[in-house]
C-alpha cells in the first residue's frame, strides 16, 4: 500500500510559537469565519449538480476545474461528504505551496474541510503532479485552478489534464456567478459577491480521459469548456 500523502504538511520553518499561533491559527480562523458568515447570506442555486451527485453515489473521483478569479466562494461548489472504511471522512483536496503563504492558505481551507497537498506546480510541476496523483488514488477529489497561482489569467496549464489521464478521475468544469459583485484589482480580477447576493453555480458535463489521450488536444478541449463557462458567468445576470 502506498504511503499516505502528507496533507497540509509544513514546508519550511514558520517562526516563533506566537507567530505561528497568530499567522497560522488565529488569522486563518478569522478569515474562514468571515468567509463562512459571508456565504451564509448568499442565495445559492446549482445547475448540473445531478451528474456530479451521480459520480459521488458511484464512488467515482473527480476534478473540479475553475478559473482562479472564481475561487472566492468556490467551496459552495462541493456540498459533498464522502465516507470510506472506519467512517473516515474524505472530501476535496487542493494544491498549496510550501511557502508561508501556502501554509496560511492551507490552514484557512481546513476550516472548510478542504485539505492541502503541498507543492507548487509552477516551481516543481513533476513533484506536485505526483502528490496530486497519490491523493486522488487515496480517495480525494481535487479542486484545481488551471491558471493559478500567478497566471497568466484564464490560460490553462497542463497539470489538470495529466492528473485526469493518469488517475482516471472525471473532469468537471465549474464556474459561479453573482447577481451583485465587484472585482478586486489583483492579477486574477477576483470576483467577490456583495452580501445577500444570488449565487448560481454551474457544472459542466463530467467526462473522463483515456490513458493514452493527447494532452495538447485535451487541454484545448478543456480550455474551450472553461471559457464557455466564463462567458456564461459574465452574462447570466445581464440577459
Image (cartoon, grey):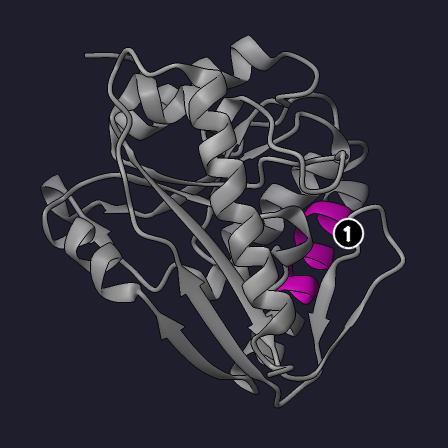
Quarter containing the N terminus:
top left
- Report the residue at 77% width, 51% height from top: 22
- Report the residue at 28% width, 26% height from top: 209
Residue 38: x and y in percent read 62, 79
For mark 1, what is the residue? 22
Residue 92: x and y in percent read 38, 45
- Report the residue at 74% width, 23% height from top: 13
Residue 232 falls in which quadrant of the image? bottom right
- Report the residue at 21% width, 45% height from top: 88
Whether residue 46 sits left or right of residue 117 in the image: it is: left
Work out whether 24 lies above or below 48.
Answer: above
Residue 224: x and y in percent read 52, 41
Q: Residue furthest bottom?
A: 196
Residue 152 falls in which quadrant of the image? top right
Q: Secondary structure at mark 1?
A: helix
Please rate how many residues cluster around mark 1, counting C-alpha atoms within 10 Å: few if below 14, some from 14 to 19, many from 20.
Answer: few
- Closer to the camera, 189 or 86? 189
Whether residue 213 sits left or right of residue 159 in the image: it is: left
**Does the segment drawn in magenta span residue 135?**
no
How many circles with numbers are drawn on the protein? Answer: 1
Whether residue 94 sits left or right of residue 139 in the image: it is: right
User: Which span of residues is magenta-colored?
Assistant: 21-32
Residue 172: x and y in percent read 37, 46
**Does the segment drawn in magenta span residue 30?**
yes
Whether residue 50 sits left or right of residue 25 in the image: it is: left
Residue 236 falls in which quadrant of the image? bottom right
- Closer to the camera, 38 or 64? 64
Query: Is any part of residue 233 visible from this angle?
Result: yes
Quarter containing the C terminus:
bottom right
Work out whether 24 lies above or below 199.
Answer: above
Query: Is any part of residue 5 visible from this angle?
Result: no
Name the main secondary structure of what is drawn in magenta: helix
Amino acid at each position: 500500500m502506498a504511503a499516505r500523502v502528507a496533507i497540509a504538511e509544513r514546508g519550511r520553518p514558520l517562526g516563533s510559537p506566537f507567530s505561528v499561533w497568530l499567522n497560522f491559527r488565529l488569522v486563518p480562523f478569522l478569515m474562514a469565519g468571515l468567509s463562512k458568515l459571508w456565504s451564509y447570506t448568499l442565495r445559492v442555486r446549482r445547475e448540473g449538480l445531478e451528474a456530479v451527485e451521480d459520480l459521488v453515489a458511484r464512488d467515482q473521483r473527480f476534478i473540479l476545474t475553475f478559473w482562479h478569479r472564481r475561487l472566492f466562494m468556490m467551496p459552495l461548489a462541493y456540498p459533498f461528504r464522502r465516507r470510506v472504511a472506519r467512517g473516515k471522512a474524505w472530501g476535496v483536496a487542493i494544491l498549496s505551496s510550501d511557502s508561508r503563504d501556502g501554509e496560511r492558505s492551507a490552514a484557512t481551507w481546513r476550516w472548510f474541510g478542504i485539505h492541502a497537498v503541498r507543492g507548487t506546480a509552477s516551481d516543481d510541476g513533476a513533484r506536485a503532479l505526483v502528490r496530486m496523483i497519490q491523493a486522488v488514488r487515496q480517495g480525494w477529489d481535487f479542486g484545481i485552478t488551471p491558471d493559478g497561482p500567478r497566471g497568466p489569467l484564464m490560460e490553462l496549464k497542463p497539470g489538470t489534464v495529466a492528473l485526469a489521464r493518469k488517475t482516471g478521475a472525471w473532469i468537471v468544469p465549474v464556474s459561479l456567478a453573482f447577481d451583485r459583485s465587484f472585482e478586486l484589482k489583483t492579477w486574477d480580477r477576483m470576483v467577490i459577491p456583495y452580501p445577500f447576493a444570488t449565487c448560481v453555480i454551474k457544472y459542466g458535463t463530467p467526462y473522463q480521459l483515456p490513458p493514452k489521450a493527447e494532452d495538447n488536444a485535451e487541454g484545448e478541449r478543456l480550455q474551450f469548456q472553461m471559457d464557455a463557462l466564463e462567458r456564461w458567468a459574465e452574462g447570466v445576470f445581464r440577459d
